[in-house]
Image (cartoon, helix red, strand yellow):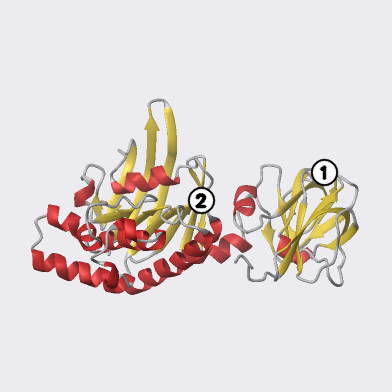
Amino acid sequence: MAEVILKGIRKSYGDIETLHGIDLDIKDGEFVVFVGPSGCGKSTLLRTIAGLEDITAGELFIDGTVCNDIPPAKRGIAMVFQSYALYPHMSVAENMAFGLKLAGVSKSEMQEAVQRAARILQIEHLLERKPKALSGGQRQRVAIGRAIVRKPNVFLFDEPLSNLDAALRVQMRIEIAKLHRELATTMIYVTHDQVEAMTLADRIVVLSAGKVEQVGHPIELYNHPVNLFVAGFIGSPKMNFLPGELISATPGTARVKLENGDVVQAEVDASHLAIGSRVTFGVRPEHVLADGPLGDNVLHGTLQVAEHLGDVTYLYIDVEGGAEHMIVRAGADNKARRGEAIIVGLPAQHCYLFDEQGVACKRVGAVVSPQLA
């Protein structure tokens, strides 16, 4: 196991800088997930840790050693890629042992390492098969097994589940979580799927345009996003945003006039903002009320689409003055139909407020656990 520390990590390709001074401390045995949209720099950051990309500036420490100029094979890491990259002419056992063979490990040690990894991943019965005889999930287990046999100090995963169908992704998420508990090894995992990040991570690193936006426990990021970007990225479906103007503020409550003229309030501290300043009002779909008492913040809209998913119904509502549809998580038995007038409630204790620069005001209201799955 090993601690991984990044100090001022920068990466440039000619005049184009893609990582802008990343500072991060990943604890020994921690499971950290890098998440963000395509092009945010998460895979580039992972590759600099692996040694597959040179570091332009800054220092990388693995287990207390500066690793900037240490080749990948000597960093004590093992990487699992999106592509399985298995040799088609080799058996599962031979694929898993190949790296050890190149390192000159004895046959008995290789066999022992392969058997141990196969036992952990429950693929002992597949060791004599060729990759073409395996399912996608089984192939990914083999790729992970190839990493396990090296007994690395740090596991690096670069979107390892992207090639799997939805059901297999859920299954493999569970397997990777179990693997981390069993091995207790430092793991760094890259994904664009924030649900994957929420379910796997001890801590999430949210990246945007080569910069760290926020680092924290999944529930911390869900309940207390620091800005509009994190609020819109963490949560599924994403948070609803309504532009408006701040008309009053105390350390406990802010009142906002929306663009349609409605006045709503949020239990946040906006006392540092100027009255009349432009703000963004936010509320998550699972906190919008549509099936019972609506409370004080009431909005009127028109239903455009209703998605009935069995256990839940998502309503997409046009609200006057809103930049986009408001999404509401309603009960499974909600009977609303397209074109109907809809009234929804926004509980003040579950609402958010962001200033003109997108920075979140501190919330003082109650919070509930997310419903992301």
- Residue drawn at (37%, 69%) of the image: 180
Which image quadrant for residue 181? Answer: bottom left
Residue denoted by label 2: 192
- Residue drawn at (80%, 62%) of the image: 346
Which quadrant would the N terminus be assigned to in this image?
Answer: bottom left
- Residue drawn at (31%, 50%) of the image: 85
Q: Position of residue 36 (x, y in %)?
A: 52, 48
Q: Position of residue 153 (x, y in %)?
A: 26, 61
* Element type at mark 1: loop
- Whole-Å distance between the Cαs marked 1 and 2? 37 Å
Q: Earlier in the sequence, mark 1 or mark 2?
A: 2
Q: Residue furthest toward the front? A: 133
Which quadrant would the C terminus be assigned to in this image?
Answer: bottom right
- Residue drawn at (27%, 70%) of the image: 118
Q: Is residue 5 visible?
A: yes
Callout count: 2
Residue denoted by label 1: 276
Q: Residue furthest toward the top? A: 15
* Element type at mark 2: loop
Q: Nearer the viewer, residue 49 or 151?
A: 151
Q: Estimate how packed mark 2 is, as few (under 14), some (14 to 19) or many (20 or more) residues with alpha carbons within 10 Å.
A: many
